[in-house]
Image (cartoon, grey):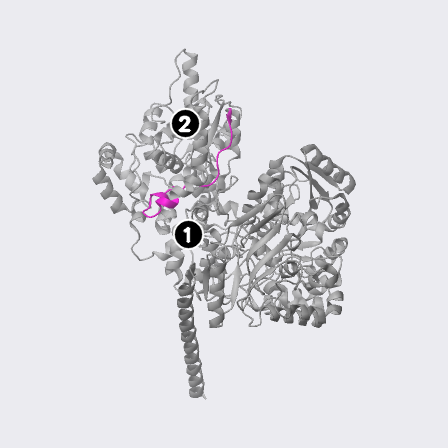
Amino acid sequence: MAESDTNTAARATAAETTTAEAAATAATALARALRTAVRGEVEFDAAARALTTMDASNYRRVPVGVVAPRDAADTAAALAVCREHGVPVVPRGAGTSIAGNATGVGVVLDLTRHLRSIVSVDPQARTAVVQPGVVLDDLRAAVRPYGLTFGPDPSTHSRCTLGGMIGNNACGSHSVAWGTTADNVQGLSVLTYGGDTLRLGRGWDGAPAGLRELIDRNLAPLRTGFPTGLPRLISGYALHALLPEAGPDLARAFCGSEGTLGVVTEATVRLVEAPAARALAVLGYPDESAAAEAAAGLLPYGPLTVEGMAEDLVRVRDGDGGGGGGGGGQALPRGGAWLFVETGGAIPAEARAAAMEILRAADPLDGMVVDDPAGQRALWRVREDAAGTATRMADGSEAWPGWEDCAVPPARLGAYLRDFRALLAAHGLRGTPYGHFGDGCIHVRIDFDLLSEDGVRRFRRFSEEAAGLVVAHGGSLSGEHGDGLARSEMLSRMYGDELTGLFRQFKDVWDPAGGMNPGVLARPARLDENLRFSVLPRERVDVAFGYPHDGPGGGDFSAAVRRCVGVAKCRVAGPSSGPEVMCPSFRATGEEQHSTRGRARLLHEMLAGEVVTDGWRSEEVRDALDLCLSCKGCRSDCPVGVDMATYKAEFLHHHYRGRRRPAAHYALGRLPVWLRAAAPFAPVLNAAARVPPLAGLAKRLAGIAPERTIPRLAPETFGRWLRRHMKGRTEVFTRGRTVILWPDTFTEHLAPSVGQAAVRVLEAAGVGVVVPPGERGGQRGRGGQVCCGLTYVSTGQLDQARTVMRRTLDRMEPLLDLDLPVLVLEPSCAATLTTDLPELFPGDPRAARLAASVRTFAQALEECAPEWEPPRLDRAVAGQTHCHQHAVLGDAADRRLRERAGLTGELSGGCCGLAGNFGFERGHYDVSVACAEDQLLPSVRAAEEAGKAGGAGRGAGRGAELLADGFSCRTQLDQLGGHRARHMAEVLAEALGEARGEARGEAPADGPAGAR
């Protein structure tokens, strides 16, 4: 028996090997044929496949390859090759679908790379002709000068594509006014898997053979089988759009077909007039059912939106446990749930009057009208980020989109939500409902256990009962985003066997070979198959960081990677329109692998081991992370807090363990060591760095980009200056009026003027300064130094980072007992102490104490000298908030300090592109420059141009004050254009010096020595 079992196992292994070899041979032949026929990119490598295994759903299907056609002819050529080889095709836009319909096992057609042209705009006819890869916000920007917009606006409007919106019949928050995508499509150009080119619009022209006959034979079930009174009837195929009494509309029937019928190559869409002014009525209710019951009654007032959310969502976002926060600082009215009701008008007063009318008619528990655009944007951000923020419950546990987007008649929504909450409770589940209350459409993330077999069985049972509940309320399983892999199996519960049989026949008329996105809508896959979590390791991965918020008790790297749910807020191309940072490398390259989501997907596949097979040694992951700037922007800007800078450091730590590292890791990653060693020889080394052959040799050996200039070493370190400055003084500190000044490497060796200025300002404000032990006593041994470990962390040298940090904690321990704020002038060092230090020492209470003590310059002044008034500068500012400060520390105190000093205007968002070692490393220069050109350099040039125009008053002729607290930001500005930016401390110190000089009757100076 044992021998027989062994032989059986051997035969099975041989069969699997033969099958795998045959599949590899077939894939190679397919790739070769596609590369011959298609002008666009054909990618069958592991990285390309890994990047497209998932969308924004719970599902995962592994494609055989990815093709990015350049035009319609290229698309047709790709379809012909796939048809010849019998390989299915999945059209894909931005991959933000929540139902799994943008995943597939065949060839993925990436329509976002090349098919993204706005072909024409006709303002008189209010139409536009677009290719499928056009991003919705790009279309809206193109038609905005005509006072027009495209009505449907999903929360992913900054990255979703028109092709994807057509495929899913996307809706968005304004559908109560302007309808679904199907309501706004006039005509479509479509390629079928069989090779036909069709032009679809109203009437039967362009219909595939046999379609009209199918409809004519089945008029009775088509007339009675679809629910009525549903503004969001998205589930299944829209066969009712082909009934004769409706006036057959082929384009409308095609919308929502989820890539199962053909590929859209061009669309003519209708545009609507955009209100010149908008106002937002925010209405508070005791609970979500009360808000839902009120929503339907507001529709006769003609609002643009009626959106709803409950306090769960606000708690998840803000973590404050209550319903009074949210909105990015904009307080919400009292209540346990809210309606956001937007109104429009030709002028602000008209929009506000309409909102006030709704406020009076709504009878809320509490309410307000917001007509300030900034306030409205802050509130809408809570709603738009919900697809991400709702994936974490108030206690930090995970929640998933397994039952998204169902819709019921708006009048039934309140009753449905009560029943739905009861169903959740009966299954021991929790969810966070929110969404389009005016359309009866609800989004919800639920804390399913999709990791264990029992949890998956419970997920299935709940889904079956939830489908029955929706049908009992006369609803649609999908009110947006389509049915996909999540709900297609349940369509028979909604429509019955006869109508779902017609769906299969409809599919076969368009796609008799079954090559378009199989497993979706017709002949569906099971909803508990293809779950993306099933391939992840069940055992905890050995990691260096603590990941305190990931997994029970923290420390679960798989849970950290699972944070990315695919909503792709990181995939916004072109210059950012706001203060956000994420994701500078994607905006520079436009490539999925250089987005936060793309990197997270590759890490997911690395853990899975199916497509990316080399684990921590993976070159695919290494190459994708190579252009990650470690800006930490995703830590704050990603709705679910994906922290790619930490993941990158973790990966590099494992990837290079026991192996030779790139030269830049040794040169730049260990910068504090080299700078301390070089300090006594600063004049000689500075002179050598200005000799081109010597500088070129040094850069080549250190792995530094040849385009870069080696920064100048300070002739006198900050520590030496401070010893002279403090000589003879007796240290006396007063609690609440004293700070520990952190001697960061950059201030110490490269920019001592920042430290000097900070000391002068602190003294003027009456704040005492102490430094860590050994920093003033002349100790230059290893034991006399403190260091945050930033450069070691950013290059993934985590063993060395921990050694440095442990030594720092030992040196800082006596001062921590004084309970003083620790002022860190360099934002990147402050962020490292705040985040990386406690996450590398999760069991050391000293790390948590030090992290909690860290303050920025503005925070320290505000905390220790709240009554101090800075000198008035009364001029504009330009420059950049450091990306690490934005992501980790916040800039509210900086804004208040600038306001008190009379510095007006906003600093730009984004990342400067130098980002510590990143911009200095060989091979990164072009991307580094592109990141700087995203926001920073244009804002600085604009400010300098404005300054050339002159002006009256103090500071006339100087233009805007260029502020950049980060050494990297200042260096980037200097090296890419000679722009001289300063730390806020330097600006204030200069003004204090001018004020003293004016008091003595002296002419104003240009600034403190070394400031420029």
Q: Are marks 2 and 1 in contact (CB under 8 Å)?
A: no
Q: Closest to the observer: 576 or 892? A: 576
What SS does tag 1 mark? helix
Q: Is residue 903 visible?
A: yes
**Which quadrant of the rendered structure holds the C terminus?**
top left
The percent position of residue 591, horizontal first and vertical second, equals 44, 52
Q: Closest to the observer: 117 or 157? A: 117
Q: Quadrant of residue 477?
A: bottom right
The percent position of residue 752, horizontal first and vertical second, equals 35, 30
**Which quadrant of the rendered structure holds the N terminus?**
bottom left
Q: Quadrant of residue 653?
A: bottom left
Q: Amino acid at mark 2?
A: Glu
Mark 2 packing: few (<14 Cα in 10 Å), some, or many (20+)? many
Q: Mark 2 or mark 1: which comes first in sequence?
A: 1
The percent position of residue 805, horizontal first and vertical second, equals 38, 45
The residue segment tinted magenta is: 902-927
Left/right placement of residue 804 relative to residue 518 reads: left
What SS does tag 2 mark? helix
Q: Is residue 805 magenta?
A: no
Left/right placement of residue 432 relative to residue 66 reads: right
Give the overall secondary structure of the magenta segment: loop
The percent position of residue 387, horizontal first and vertical second, equals 59, 52
Q: Give the numbered dot on residue 648.
A: 1
Which residue is pictured at 49% across the width and 72% down the height?
86
Up/down of 986 relative to 880, above or below: above
Q: Amino acid at mark 1?
A: Lys
Left/right placement of residue 338 relative to residue 670 reads: right
Q: Tell me how far mark 2 sits from mark 1, CA to CA.
A: 34 Å
Q: Is residue 906 magenta?
A: yes
Which residue is pictured at 56% across the width and 43% down the height?
141
Badge 2 is on which residue?
A: 986
Q: Is residue 319 visible?
A: no
